Image (tube, coloured by chain):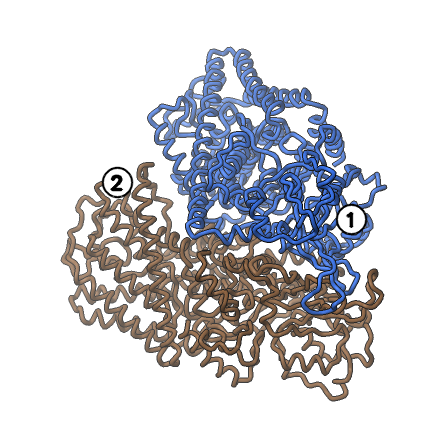
Chain colours: A blue, B brown
């Protein structure tokens, strides 16, 4: 973690110089991640995280419905027509998300297949002419150029586009706002990561009516001007992305469900299925069109990645043993892979931190290394004779597809490693999954292929170009499966192709199941405050009251507050929500001495809006409902951003008052101070909160009605442990899991 | 609803005579569902519901972790080995659930295929000999007998086994405990409902170590002695059931996800996949075994219901229009079906209410009606000549499978309606889905088939035999799809078989999506207190405080309570949870006058346990931790049941005290009284609660620290509306959806 911290701090200094305020953060506590400096033992939070390859500001999202008077008014006045409009729009947007994701995926596939296809065709031609060096230069040069373009674009223009993108989406759906979504460039390794990102970006852009600068202000879209509906749309988008990458609607939905979405409703299931179905229809239509040969080198391939519909593999019940062996070994390998990936990513973070030039150089050296391996390794293996009895008449294939690549071999022979390496990734997958080819690949070639993809997968993942993660793992896994298949050949009758599929599946699934998954590793490294599904066991031993004690005392506002106090509070704290408490209220029953009343929670954004619109009162009085409706609309309240520094308040105005009652959320979720952190976290995550109020368990005169306020950062295990180091010790000494 | 109410009341009287106490219910408020009698305007609840075909007592489940001192102690002392044991056991049980469900599904299939197969074979033989009347008598007799056996078993021995079973499972996973799970008998209509139920029952039995009477008390199983782990297991079980019915692991998981499970965690996804995979392996092994002909008439059929792997249907992008038409019309039809089903079920409830004989007669008359239709209708249609060019050489088929049934036709001709009717349901599905048979079925036959299954589906569903719901709908849908296909024939090139699949899908899905689904209708009719995912819109307008006002005042206990008071409270109320409040506590800060403290919530079951074990104190004092550990184990606390009537307390003991602190859950979930009911309901459902405490928003001396307590019944729309009828009016007059 320390390398990450240094990076964060370096950039943090930068950002602060630019005048941005750090929110949800105490003035001098960027040191949070340095457990060596223990001078500051308050629970605090770092609002910085790495989005893509850039350190950015992060904020939590309001998935909770902010039930203030204005919302209620707006909601009550919503007519049946408007409700129908909303439902129609929801489905329309789901449709558009699917449509656009499908179209973009199509275009990307077209570009990739054509660029890679022509590149490989040229290389193969050179080799046929035995101009090996020229072939290498051409291939390395093309790779170098493509990587350069991608890396320059990523480093200079769109740093958030690098990397797989999936961790960012996952964090967003967990409730972390990440400034994200720019155009993506070419794809180097796998395409599912970028496609998921693209799908989500389309969804996000549609939800807000276009990019920030050219936003369509359609009346209907105001229904989607909230984080909840946007989240649903983005879930649809990410499913569509997976579906576009693998052409599997069910797979897309399951991926969204298992890996990405924190929060799930069965209503969403149908909408995501609808989006993915649209994607499939679009891809299908496009493939029909391309059959007539209008799409350059793009043929039947490219899109049908795992189309095994024509294959009916026979298997028997007793084959379960080798399958189980594959699964277990695959799980172990998957875990190892994750472990090493973790290490490599750490090293990369150190390099990336040194500046843009280093990032570029890293990308380019990885590209050259890849070219050397891809081109050089096939020379190591022996040429294999074509199987005369094979149904496939064309061996070796000289065209673009097919199982048998001639490469440097004489006629009638093929190079099995070149078949896997000198081709696009999609074709490699298709070749290695092909069935009824038990002798096609030699175990030596498979071992080289496996080792190469292990290394490439590890080194490519962290560089500053958009890349995916599934494809290298699938290739590794299928090579591993085939190797095992050859080893077990005498004992079973399972087809080698099936072994490859099983190997790929085991590497993907089992490693994912028992280990922190790769995405989780990345989430942690990037510092995205992702809230885990399962609370740590030691969280049962502390109460939220204890957490509140180590936090700075909560800042509350009165129901009718002086403007000067509001300005002061906004300037001196970075909190995003303030409890509103009325003192001296006479409760309907109980003591006549007056009581304090917890009225609700007001958001920083709304306070700034009040100051901007100068909705001040001369005297200390409650306002009427129409007064607030005259000044604010629910669209105003949905706006985000705005900084206290941009607001100017005159001295006279400072002496005036603001009635916060109509603007505060009267129904915040609360916990009693004796609640355990584990259960509070379940509530926080399940309901999708941003702020949670802590109430006292005592009831008496003089007890303040709010003990504290909890945010996402306060509930993260890492932050709690650094604020309460004694927990770490007791946790270590005890045997709790 | 009224017929249901009468039924409930009649049985309620019965049950009360048997001395069972009605829990979570005020003494005289069984009248809840009768809005005509408005004398009693308190929010109350009916603990009775129809489980299967029998009115039973229902109770809520404790999915929340009860964090009392004992739990914490137990949890802290859990070693790493034990944690591993737990994880291992979790997966082992998931495996066993899959294995047993697969085995039982296999046996059921074997029985059904054999019984139905021999029956049909005999009938066909009679027809070949032109002994039509004899054939009818044989068929009607066999059906009659089978229905009789099933109905007698259901009515007399296992009333909870009737019906589809899925609504009960759905309610269980939503948090309603239903006394359920007995052996299932033959299946008349569809098999997925009973199989889901069987899967869940197996899971439940495994979780508790066997049936109540012969329970294995394995040490490891104590980890599963809580409602949470049992719920997870039952989710696995229901997925396995669907998977066994349709042989689709992904389908099983998605079904569980969409239809059944209220609550979902991604960890569960992997375990349910594991269970369903085991089911598939078992079924596969069994089919291999049966291939050699050891299973009587059971052949390749039976299990492969929707095996379309051999079929590669061609479709084009422009075919989307007819597909959309199918979908929309299917949705309308599906809604209509649901509507009529609702009516029919109401009528059936009236009949069922009249006693066991009526139930039996109803089942038997439905059976005879079915036999008459099945046998008689094929005579209405004309014989159709066999297609000479067809690849299938055997037409008409006289054996058991095949598309073309001769029935009453001469050689070389076949009866298309008999092909669909005089066969098992699985074969009927296979026949109607068969592709490349555009002219096989005449539109007249299809119309008859469609109408017949509409009627049969409606009338069979409510009778007192175990039955499913998917199969009739699938058959209806596929007939409808084929009809449309014939109608649209000139315009598209889609295969009729594909039309059938699409029709079935549209009837299943679209009707489900826009309408209350069939299961929801049944849930409502049965009175199971299912908490919906979406709060009603008007729930935003009332606060939980207003709900608490119309409830009887909350009954609280002191931290150290007199035995006599506990006994009195338990005898006079039916609540299941009591807030524990300490008075006169000196809080760490604030007023020195003493405060009241909300300590937690104690469950009725634990109070009864204290009384049973006579854990009394002579004086009013706090106990030490070791004292409670001496007397109670966490296994004791996990036990349910036990009635206050069974406990005898002497007069001396009545004057003693009980320290409730160590037994109360110190971390109950709470809401402030100003919380809207809509948001409270989201919390209740998302976190899976049984009790939710309402706290006051005022803080002052003399304000009681608990305003009220909410249960599942209090949050149901129907109950709120009958307690606060003015909401109904404002709801109706306003246009809010």
Other residues around mark 1 within 10 Å, as few (<14) / some (14–19) / many (≥20): some
Label 1 near label 2: C-beta < 8 Å?
A: no
The correct choice, above or below, for A129 with respect to B590 in the image is above
Distance from disc 2 to disc 1, alpha carbons, whole Å, reads 69 Å
- Residue A516 visible to an observer of this rendering: no
Residue A275 x %, y %: 44, 42
Query: Depth check: A392 or A675 in front?
Result: A675
A210 left or right of A282?
Answer: right
- Look at the picture and state if A221 lies above or below B341: above
The label shown at residue A680 is none
Going by the image, does B528 lie left or right of A2?
A: left
Give the residue drawn at x 63%, y 60%.
Answer: B674
Output the chain of dot 1. A
Residue hosting label 1? A551
Pick the residue in front: A151 or B2. B2
Residue A128, x across and y down, in percent? 46, 14
Mark number, residue B492? 2
Q: Position of residue B131 (x, y in %)?
A: 17, 69
């Amino acid at each position: 973690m320390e390398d990450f911290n240094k990076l964060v701090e370096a950039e943090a200094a930068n950002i602060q110089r630019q005048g941005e305020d750090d929110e949800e953060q105490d003035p001098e506590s960027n040191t949070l991640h340095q457990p060596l400096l223990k001078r500051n033992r308050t629970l605090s939070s770092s609002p910085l995280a790495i989005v893509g390859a850039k350190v950015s500001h992060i904020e939590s999202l309001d998935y909770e419905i902010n039930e203030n008077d204005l919302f209620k008014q707006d909601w009550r006045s919503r007519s049946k027509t408007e409700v129908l409009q909303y439902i129609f729009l929801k489905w329309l947007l789901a449709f558009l998300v699917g449509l656009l994701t499908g179209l973009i995926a199509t275009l990307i596939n077209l570009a990739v297949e054509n660029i890679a296809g022509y590149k490989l065709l040229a290389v193969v031609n050179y080799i046929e002419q035995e101009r090996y060096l020229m072939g290498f230069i051409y291939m390395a040069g093309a790779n170098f150029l493509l990587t350069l373009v991608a890396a320059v674009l990523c480093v200079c223009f769109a740093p958030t586009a690098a990397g797989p993108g999936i961790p960012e989406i996952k964090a967003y759906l967990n409730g972390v706002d990440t400034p994200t979504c720019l155009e993506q460039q070419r794809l180097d390794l796998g395409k599912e990561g970028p496609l998921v990102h693209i799908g989500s970006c389309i969804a996000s852009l549609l939800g807000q009516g276009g990019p920030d600068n050219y936003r369509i202000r359609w009346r209907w879209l105001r229904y989607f001007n909230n984080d909840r509906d946007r989240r649903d749309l983005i879930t649809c988008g990410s499913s569509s992305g997976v579906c576009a990458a693998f052409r599997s609607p069910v797979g897309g939905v399951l991926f969204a469900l298992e890996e990405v979405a924190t929060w799930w409703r069965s209503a969403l299931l149908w909408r995501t299925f609808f989006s993915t179905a649209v994607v499939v229809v679009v891809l299908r239509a496009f493939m029909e069109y391309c059959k007539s040969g209008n799409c350059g080198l793009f043929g039947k391939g490219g899109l049908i990645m795992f189309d095994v519909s024509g294959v009916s593999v026979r298997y028997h019940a007793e084959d379960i043993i080798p399958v189980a062996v594959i699964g277990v070994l695959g799980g172990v390998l998957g875990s190892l892979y994750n472990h090493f990936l973790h290490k490599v990513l750490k090293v990369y973070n150190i390099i990336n931190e040194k500046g843009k030039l280093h990032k570029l150089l890293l990308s380019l050296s990885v590209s050259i290394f890849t070219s050397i391996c891809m081109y050089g390794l096939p020379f190591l293996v022996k040429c294999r004779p074509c199987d005369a009895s094979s149904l496939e008449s064309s061996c070796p294939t000289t065209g673009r597809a097919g199982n048998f690549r001639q490469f440097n071999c004489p006629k009638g022979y093929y190079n099995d490693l070149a078949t896997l390496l000198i081709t696009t990734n999609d074709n490699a997958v298709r070749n290695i999954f092909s069935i009824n080819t038990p002798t096609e690949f030699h175990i030596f070639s498979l071992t080289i292929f496996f080792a190469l993809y292990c290394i490439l997968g590890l080194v490519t993942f962290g560089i500053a170009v958009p890349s995916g993660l599934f494809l290298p793992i699938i290739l590794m896994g299928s090579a591993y499966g085939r190797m095992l298949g050859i080893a077990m050949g005498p004992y079973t009758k399972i087809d080698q192709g099936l072994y490859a599929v099983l190997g790929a599946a085991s590497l993907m699934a089992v490693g994912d199941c028992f280990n922190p998954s790769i995405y989780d590793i990345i989430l942690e490294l990037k510092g995205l405050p992702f809230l885990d599904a399962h609370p740590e066991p030691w969280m049962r031993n502390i109460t939220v009251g204890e957490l509140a004690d180590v936090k700075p005392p909560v800042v509350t506002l009165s129901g009718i507050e002086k403007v000067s106090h509001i300005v002061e509070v906004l300037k001196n704290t970075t909190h995003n929500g303030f409890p509103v408490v009325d003192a001296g209220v006479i409760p309907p029953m109980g003591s006549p001495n007056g009581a304090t009343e917890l009225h609700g929670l007001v958001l920083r954004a709304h306070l700034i809006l009040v100051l901007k619109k100068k909705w001040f009162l001369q005297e200390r009085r409650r306002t009427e409902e129409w007064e607030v409706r005259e000044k604010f609309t629910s669209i105003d309240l949905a706006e985000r951003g705005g900084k206290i520094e941009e607001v100017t308040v005159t001295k006279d105005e400072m002496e005036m008052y603001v009635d916060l009652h109509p603007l505060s959320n009267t129904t915040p979720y609360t916990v009693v101070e004796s609640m355990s952190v584990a259960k509070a976290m379940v509530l926080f995550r399940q309901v999708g909160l941003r702020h949670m109020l802590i109430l006292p368990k005592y009831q008496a005169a003089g007890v303040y009605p709010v003990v504290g306020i909890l945010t996402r950062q306060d509930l993260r295990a890492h932050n709690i442990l650094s604020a309460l180091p004694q927990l770490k010790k007791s946790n270590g000494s005890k045997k709790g899991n």
